[in-house]
Structure formats: C-alpha cells, structure tokens
Amino acid sequence: MSQFQIKFMPENRVIEAEHGASLLSVAAKAGIMIKSGCGGKGTCGACKVEIISGDPIVNGTGNLTPEQLSKGIRLACKTSVQGDMTVEVPPESRLQEHQVLLGDAPKGIIQESEHDLLEKFGRQPLALKQRISLSKPTLTENSSDWARLSIELRRALKTGDKPIHIPLSVLKHLPESLRKANWDVSVTMTDTEAELTVTHIEQGNDVPPYGLAVDIGTTTVVVYLINLLTGEIVDQQGTYNKQAKYGDDVITRIVYAVESEQNLIEIRDAVVGTVNGLLDKILARQSLSSKDIASAMVAGNTTMTQLFLGVDPRYIRLEPYIPTMTTVPSFSAQEIGLHMLPEALVHCYPSVASYVGGDIVAGTLVTDLANGEDIILFIDIGTNGEIVLGNQDWLVSCACSAGPSFEGGGITFGMRAMPGAIERIFIDPETLDVSLKVINDQTPVGICGSGLVDCMAKLLGAGIIDRAGNFQLGHKSGSQRIRATADDKEFVLAWAHQAGGEKDVVITENDVKNVIRAKGAIYAGIRSLLNMVAVDIDMISRIVIAGGFGNYLNIHDAVQIGLLPDLEPERFEFIGNASVKGARLALLSQNAWREAEELGRKMTYVELSVGATYMDEYMAALFLPHTDMNLFPSFQ
Ligand code: FES
C-alpha cells in the first residue's frame, strides 16, 4: 500500500500514513493528541484542523461553516489521507497536559481524617518485603532451598499458620537466586487474607517495597508512588487518559470498544499505556526499577475498570445495565501489562453497579460516610455525576449522566481546566464590560467548568439571560457584546484581539442551555435520592464534593445557578481526588480494603431511568436556579 508523508504543524513533525487513514488516527500516531468529543462521528466539532496543503478525502464536514471550509478547516475524524499533506493543529483542538487533580484539597479537614482513617483501619499493606539471611546448606544440614527459605520467612514474619506460596515462575530461579546472593536475600511478597505469595527474590538490600495508587478517571489518570513501609506518598504524576481520542464519555468509548476485538484491545492499551507512561516517569525520577513496585490498587468507574482489564463492556450500556463484575479478582501485573514486578498483584476497587464504580466506593471510604449518624451527601461533579447519600445505617447511590459540559465538552469554547481557560468572570451589570481570570494568565482561548458556572451566574446576575437561559437581546446597556448570529444568540466573553485569534470567544444560548441541562441533571439526582429515602435537604450535615472540577468550583455561584442545594457554605467541603486517596488507603490497609468491598456490597444503587421521579425533578430543575424558588431562599 502506498505511504504518504503527513506533516503536522507547528511541530513540523512528519509521519507516514496509508491511503484512507483518518487524520485523527494519524495525528495520534504522531503523538499529537486531538480532542474528539464524539469519538469520531463528526458531530462534536472538537477535532478541527487546518489543511495547509494537500488534497484529502473529506467524508463529512459536520457543523463547519462555509467560511471555515473556505479557509481549509476540516474535521480530523472525517478527513482521510490520499496523498502528502501538511496539517496545522490549532491549540483549541489539542488535548494538553493540563491541570490534573492530583489529590490535594484546598481544605485540610479531609487530609487529617484520611490520616486518622489509616490509623483506624490499621496499617497492613497488600505487599511487603523481608530481608533474610540463611545459613548455607551442608552435608548434615541439607534441607531443601524452599524449606530453608520458607521456614526463615515464617519465623521473621511471625505468620502463624498462614500459608506461604511460591509460584512456579519464581521457584524455577530459586536455587540460583539464593546462591548468587550468597544466601542473603530480599524477598518480596503479596499479602492477602488467605496467603502470602513470594513474587520476587533478589540480592539482600534495604530498598523499601513500593506500591501504586492509581485513579483512572474518564478524563484524567493519576498515579501515586507509595512507600509501603512508611505509607508516605513519594511521588505523583497525572495526565489525561489517552482513551480520550475514542470519545469524551464512557458511552462513546463502550460503543467504540465493542465494534471489534481489535478496538477493545486498542482502547485497553490506551489506558494501560497511560498508566505505564506515568509510572515510567516516576521510576526514572526516583531512580527505581519496575521490580521495586510490589503492588497496585486501581480505582476507576465501572467502565474504566472493565476497559483497563480488557473485559467486554457492552452490557454496561444495554438495559438492564449489567456490569461483568462488581468485585474484581486480582491479576498479576504481567497479565495486565503494567511495568511492575511481573508477579505482583494489581487490585481493582469494587463497583456498585454499571454507573457507580470503584472511584465512588473509594470516595465513600475516604469521606468516612458510612461510620457516623450524620447524613452525608457525596457528589462527584463530572461527566457521570455520581451521588452517594447516607450514614452508618443506610447508603444509596445513583449516577445522573450530567454530560461533559463541566469538563468542556459540548460547549462552543468549552475546554478543560488548562492554561488559557477562563476560570473566573466579572461582568459589570450596567455596561456589561467583562474582566476575566485566565489560568496561567494566558490569553483566553476557551472556558473551563468552573468558569462556566461562574459565567452562568454572572450572565443571570447582569440580566443577560433570563431564568430559562434565554438571551435578552434588548439589554438596557445596549452593549455590542450581546448579539444574534445566523444560528444562535451569544455573548462575547473576549474579543478576538484579546484572545489572540481571529475569533471572539463567546458563550452561546445553546451553551447556556447545555449547562442548564447538566446542572439540572445533578440537582435532580440529588433530589431524587433525597425523595427516595424521605430525607429533607436540611437534614444533610455535610456535602462533600469530589472530582477534578470540584476543586475550582465557587460554591456561591454553583448554588445561584441551582447546581448545588441552597445550604450554608460551611456545610460544603471539597475532597479533591477522592478516588486516588481511597486507592492509597486500601493499598496500605487490608482492613480498609475489606471495608471497601463491604461498602460496595452495602450501597443500594438507584436506577434513575426507572419511574417518573427523576424526570419530573429534572424538568423542574431546567431553570435558574429552579422552578420552585422556595428551594433557593437565598436567591429569592
Ligand atoms: S467531530 Fe471529530 S471527533 Fe467529534
């Protein structure tokens, strides 16, 4: 097959591609990650590129305007190669290393309680390492190598009756390992309730055993390196999930994954590759070898967990929405393909149901929600909008598919919280003059989730939109910023000259309606759960907010637009990346791990699509802040 040269600008990177290959996949091969919200269906418009030279096959142009088309703008997913080409990938179409929430929350409360939790559960990590000096065998003291080692291990670890197992792959090298080390060895083991398993034998050393706490988010992946002896977080690294090129949300990825066996492998490799990429960076920085990593604990939503293991996810999205497993067996690093000790075990957090997964169970464990009388509401404000409500006596959960608006998807200038994203907005209610706070003080190229919430509140406050989200073209200010275009109404957040581009950065009426639907979904989810268990909003003593978005969120704005219930600000608390925190906790404590499995079983999953309650609540919430203003006394 003929190969063509595709050059990507401004990198000037040239890569060979075959006839018919989509530009989206060619770019990914060149290491240039292009956003693809709809997974290549040509509907989201996220993957715009400019064809500088060459004559590609264009299979669709989506919502591109005639003006854009005349400038050579095409959708990378709908454009394929039939000759040499030069392609410019603009910044707004790129996935970039962005602000990934590594776990630190702005408030200290949770960190302290996290520490207390580890003390409460007791520290007993899922892997350990023991240095052993053996006496050399002689003609009179001639017990076998394994007997010699296992007896000493048992003595050193005071294991009692707990069986010690050695897999064949390790046993095969045992004689050499012992003799090469001159009978002074370090033995790495995994520890489960049932048994100890030897995973590695090496020359005696004092390097501690390390473990990984991994959060696989739909959008971002975070890895912590943990010293299993001290419990300390030695290093951390995060990036976007490479699966993003197959779609922004879990459904689009499932659809892609089940198209063919090859697709499932590809999408699994993308996430395993993301984790390995982070791990390799950490190992290099810490001068460690992959053999020093003795255990891993992974927390992710149900779809992410299945895709990470390469397990067919198709029934997750088909009624009656059944995941393949909720408790997940542990597998060796070798089977999964992680750059760790090959025999080391990789554990995954248990899920509750198809749309309430291990990340939420991890968060529930860390908030200590199930251990007191107080009723606590735990919300992950993200694409999947998971909510948990309960206390020591009962736990209910649901997911309300808020969609990707808060993570930048489906919004004309929406983007993730990365440099160039507008995160705060101030609008003068008289003149409608705007001042912006942009991440890293760069020129504004788009708007992130927290910026959107802020923007909505300010648009409403200044009378630019009404409570239904309709633009008020005849605003008293007479400002040029509110205007109607051929297909929508919009408000200019930044003029083209401020944004350093040809286009004004705007928010459209359609965007506003998308945000209203997203916030409505979350609020309706909260109300439905409360109704279900007959709990009044006032009875909630704490609202704990998790997620990459929660960290930057302004509570006042969020309440004003009706995303969060109208309660005193003191009741709200941010927890940051609860998923990775929960992963660390379970990695360091077998009791915490057991408690997590218990939580997974105990939590009742409420299917919101059954019955009319959720739909009614949702319709009522499609207003700013709500159709029932009695629910928002502070904003009446
Ligand atoms: S339009 Fe190309 S990925 Fe959505």
Image: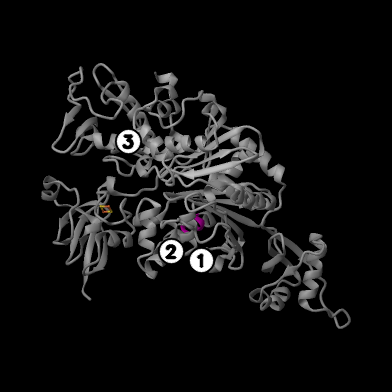
Q: Earlier in the sequence, mark 3 or mark 1?
A: 1
Closer to the camera: disc 2 or disc 3? 2
Amino acid type of the residue that numbered disc 3 sits on in the rendered structure: Gln
Relative to residue 362, is residue 513 depicted above or below? above
Q: Quadrant of residue 494?
A: top left
The residue that appears at 78% across and 70% down in the rendered structure is 150
Within 10 angstroms of label 3, few (less than 14), some, or many (20 or more) residues? some
Q: Which of the image's four quarters has the C terminus?
A: top left
Pointer 1 with pointer 2, Cβ within 8 A: yes
Within 10 angstroms of label 2, few (less than 14), some, or many (20 or more) residues? many
Amino acid type of the residue that numbered disc 2 sits on in the rendered structure: Asp
Decide whether residue 23 is among the magenta residues: no
> On residue 337, which mark appears?
1
Q: Position of residue 454 (x, y in %)?
A: 36, 29
Residue extending farthest right: 140
Q: Position of residue 381 (x, y in %)?
A: 45, 39
Residue tagged 2? 269
Residue tagged 3? 442
Q: Which residues are magenta?
A: 277-281
The residue that appears at 43% across and 32% down in the rendered structure is 553
Residue 444 visible in the current orientation: no
Residue 48 visible in the current orientation: yes
